Image (cartoon, helix red, strand yellow):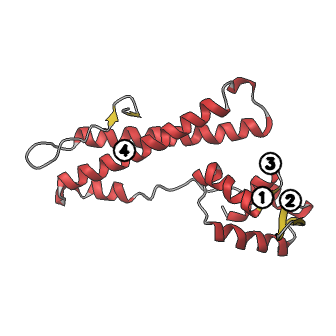
Amino acid sequence: MALEHALLVSLSEQDASGYDLTRRFDKSIGFFHSATHQQIYRVLKRMDEAGWVEVEAIAQDGRPDKKMYRVSDAGRAELTRWIAEPSEPNHLRNELAIKIRAAAHADLPALRREVARHRDGHAARLDVYRLIEKRDFPNPAALSGSSLHQYLVLRGGIRVEEGFTDWCQEVLDALPTGEYAIEDTGEYATEGHLQS
């Protein structure tokens, strides 16, 4: 997926300035597609040159004009084309998995610390996703349209983080402990949440 398509999706939901888009990325789309603020502004310029967005300059007192972006007909056509284009399933490229594979040749205490760190990071992100789910989607059965689509993407993120959190815990449970391995830090509760 190109950043252009992520921006088209966001702008299809609501017109925005470049600043607004960077904030949206920080709060939602950025969980699934990363981009720096500079990348977003560069891509918006390319999208404008390609005719995928329309730009309206809004005067501001004592400041440069604010550029508001909206999806053009050509941008909607590109989004429609892209949605219909087959996407390859993601291939798992996970450095931690390779480190675990090398455990027989590894410093097990260091590996256990690394696995615990990953587990805790995934558990923390899972907690954030669950808070968003509770706050923004209290009644999933009543959802439709773009709200339903946003919820389904969030559910995908929840499932991924549950899977990684559980897998890391499974690895920690299976790796030997004792004089050659450290004990778990205990920052993680076995139910899949960080302890308070």
Secondary element at image label 3: helix
CB contact under 8 Å: marks 4 and 1:
no
Check the picture and name the quadrant holding the C terminus.
top left
**Residue denoted by label 3:** 13
Q: Is residue 24 left or right of residue 176?
A: right
Whether residue 152 is situated above or below residue 179 in the rendered picture = above
- Most extreme residue toward the left is 179
CB contact under 8 Å: marks 2 and 1:
yes
Whether residue 166 is situated above or below residue 181 in the rendered picture = above
Residue 19 rendering spot, x and y as whole percentages: 72, 61
Secondary element at image label 1: helix
- Ranked by sequence position, the earlier of labels 1 and 3 is 1
On residue 153, the disc is none
Whether residue 63 is visible here, answered yes or no, is: yes
Which residue shows up at 77% across the image and 40% down it? Answer: 146
| CA gap, disc 2 and disc 4 | 39 Å
Amino acid type indicated by mark 4: Arg
Amino acid type indicated by mark 1: Leu
**Residue denoted by label 1:** 8
On residue 119, the disc is 4
**Residue denoted by label 2:** 71
Amino acid type indicated by mark 2: Val
- Ranked by sequence position, the earlier of labels 4 and 3 is 3
Amino acid type indicated by mark 3: Glu
Whether residue 59 is situated above or below residue 49 in the rendered picture = above
Structural crowding at the residue carrying mark 4, measured as other residues with C-alpha within 10 Å and reported as few (<14), some (14–19) or many (≥20)? many
Looking at the rendering, which quadrant does residue 7 occupy? bottom right
- Ranked by sequence position, the earlier of labels 2 and 4 is 2
Which residue shows up at 65% across the image and 52% down it? Answer: 29
Which residue shows up at 42% across the image and 40% down it? Answer: 123
